Image (tube, rainbow, N blue to C red):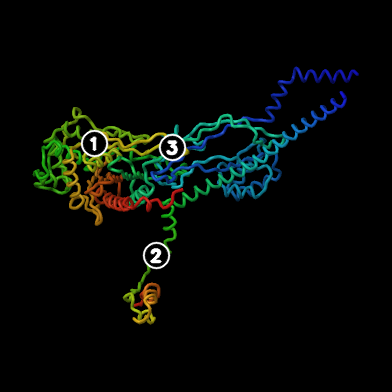
Amino acid sequence: MRTSKCIALTVLGTVLCLLHVFLQTEIVKFGYEINSASQILDTQKDKQTSLQFVLSSMQSPLNIDKSLSSDKDVYQLPDSFKLVKLSPAGSSVDSGMTAPDRAAPVLRRFAFSTFFTGRQAEARTIK
Amino acid sequence: MGLLFLFLGRLVFIQFFSSDFLVNLAKKQHSYYLEIQPKRGAIFDRNMRPLAVNVVTFSLYAVPPQIKDKDMVASELSRILDLDADFVIERLSRKKQFVWLSRKLDWDLMQKVKALDLDGLFFIKESRRSYPDSTLASQLIGFAGLDNIGLEGLEMEYDSYLKGKSGWTIVLRDAKKRELALSDILQPPVNGFSLVLTIDQMVQYIAEREIEKIFDKYKAKGAVIVVMDVKTGEVLGLANRPTFDLNDPSRYPDDARRNRAVTDYFEPGSVFKIVTAAAALDEGRFSVDDEIFCENGEYKVANHILHDVHPYGKLSFKGVIVNSSNIGTTKIAQELGAKSIYYYARLFGFGSSTSSGMPGEVTGVLKPPDVWSKTSIGAVPIGQEVCVTAIQLAAAISSIANNGVYMKPFVVRSIVDNKGEVIKSFNPELKRRVMSDETAAKLTDILESVVTEGTGKMGASKIFRFAGKTGTAQKIDADGRYSHSKFMASFIGFAPAESPEIAIVVMVDEPRPYYYGGVVCAPAFKAVAEDVLKYMHLSEKEKISEVN
């Protein structure tokens, strides 16, 4: 009885010790995982800070001004120009479309006058 | 048996006599003390747009014994980092375990070096102070050095708030020196507080844009533009020329780092006539319609002969200021007396610091009447024998715009922690009444006429009503005499005249070939005032389309 009790206690003690060792190794493993995760987080945060700085720099009016003036060829005023005369809006003849006659349904006339080219002026180029 | 006893004896010795030493040795190997640097507080403009931030950078170091092919490493690094190959080889040839190769590299460069996958090269993360607007308000903001300590400007003045406090921890590591996240931070770092300035990034930009134009156009030695909110004393923009890039200050001469608006004083010339005019009207000794004989352009004060640019006969009080007659102003001052001029000059804030919170501010020079010479009454009232700063002028003209009330100029609105909680706020401070409401209104009317029909015509706007005063002061040569080739041109004013919002000072040091304040500075005043007012009249939503 005493022997079996002793064996049982020894086994229990061994199991507890093994469990303790296991838990310790798990803690260390977690430590590594936490470390690598926090490193990734830090890297992303650092990247975010860098990008925010780049963004702020780009948004700076000084830099916008510089980038616009460096591309000033794009904004060069034309040497010659053409006058564009717009026909009065609603002139269906100018737009090349036939306007619905007065007998057409109200909805169709509304749609034509609101959305279609009948409401849009045609640009004519005059030298 | 003997061996066993020897073994046991050694065990007992280790357990009872060497344990402390060995435990300490193990602790040293497992763990190390790490100082955690705090984050330096940011600097924002009034709309929380960042003006100074911290960016992570990477400093490259090498362990020379681990590098086999030094020539190859040197050539690769010199290609990517633009380093001198001989410098890299010299560093790698040192018999050391640690040598710096390049400090504070940005992300892209770090990635390029890492991609080489070279043995013996390592990076340490460091924080670098960075300024998104590079040259914008550089003299005002100042900069922090490599160790994140403020060296100039507000970075230096408010360093104790910005720098924060270091923390420390004990870090555990294994045999391969891999760190384990098992220890708590024993003393967490306290990050620095952030500054919120009164400066508006857009107003600052407008001021910088215009100052750049006149600085270049008139090949000036220096220039300053100050934009101030007349009702609160908040400095909305403060631009200096020459200037420098905050991200690379060492490339520029020391001269470019000076915040001339507060560190440089100069004889103001005719802009100082606002003091004489205010004194005369406020004391009730003159009315705007009183006639003053301007001696047809030549007038003797003691042994000194005064001249006007154009000879005038009789001019009204208003006409004297509008046409900037030196003789008329002197005759007004002679009526008032030296004490009165001095009294009002002090009320306007001349001869004392404005306490604006900017480092290096000087008081200027304003001699008390008892040390005035016989000619001083013909000099001080027209802005000679007196020295002022641009910030003093801005505060002075603001007091006319603000119904005669002098507001203390300031540049820092608040100090906030990293959660945005206000730690300290700086509110507008009413210092004193300089003149009555009525006097301020009369002066405003006179100053408006200066722009519409007087010396400041080139500052007139088709959109807004402006009020202002021109100034052209001769500088003093090395021999102590007034120069005939070196001038200080200036224009001070406010807008809109009917309901003032902003005051602007434009000052140009030694402009060439033109040097009149009305020619050199008034157009810049107009350009700044028009754009700033248009911007200020936008809704808050339109102003800040996107804030991080």
Name the residue type under label 3. Glu
The residues bearing labels 1 and 2 have C-alpha atoms spaced at a distance of 48 Å
Q: Nearer the viewer, residue B382 or B511?
A: B382
Q: For residue B186, which quarter of the picture? A: top right
Q: In the drawing, does residue B312 fall left or right of residue A99?
A: left
Q: Residues within 10 Å of mark 3 (few under 14, many from 20)?
A: few
Name the residue type under label 1. Phe
Q: Residues within 10 Å of mark 1 (few under 14, many from 20)?
A: many
Q: Nearer the viewer, residue B53 or B388?
A: B53
| Of pointers 3 and 1, the one earlier in the residue sequence | 1
State the image coordinates of residue B321 (x, y, percent, origin top left).
16, 45
Mark 1 secondary-structure assignment: loop
Q: Which residue is tagged 1?
A: B348
Q: Which residue is tagged 3?
A: B421
Chain on which label 1 sits: B
Q: In the drawing, does residue B115 fall left or right of residue B288?
A: right
Depicted B259 relative to depicted B207: above or below: above
Residue B216 seen: no
Would you say the residues marked 1 and 2 are in contact, meaning their CB atoms lie under 8 Å apart?
Answer: no
Name the residue type under label 2. Gln
- Considering the image in quadrants, where does the N terminus of chain B appear? top right
Q: For residue B397, which quarter of the picture? A: top left
Q: Which residue is tagged 2?
A: A76
Q: Residue at x 74, y 19 (%)?
A: B18
Total number of numbered discs in the rendering: 3
State the image coordinates of residue B171 (x, y, percent, origin top left).
64, 32
Q: Residue at x 28, y 32 (%)?
A: B352
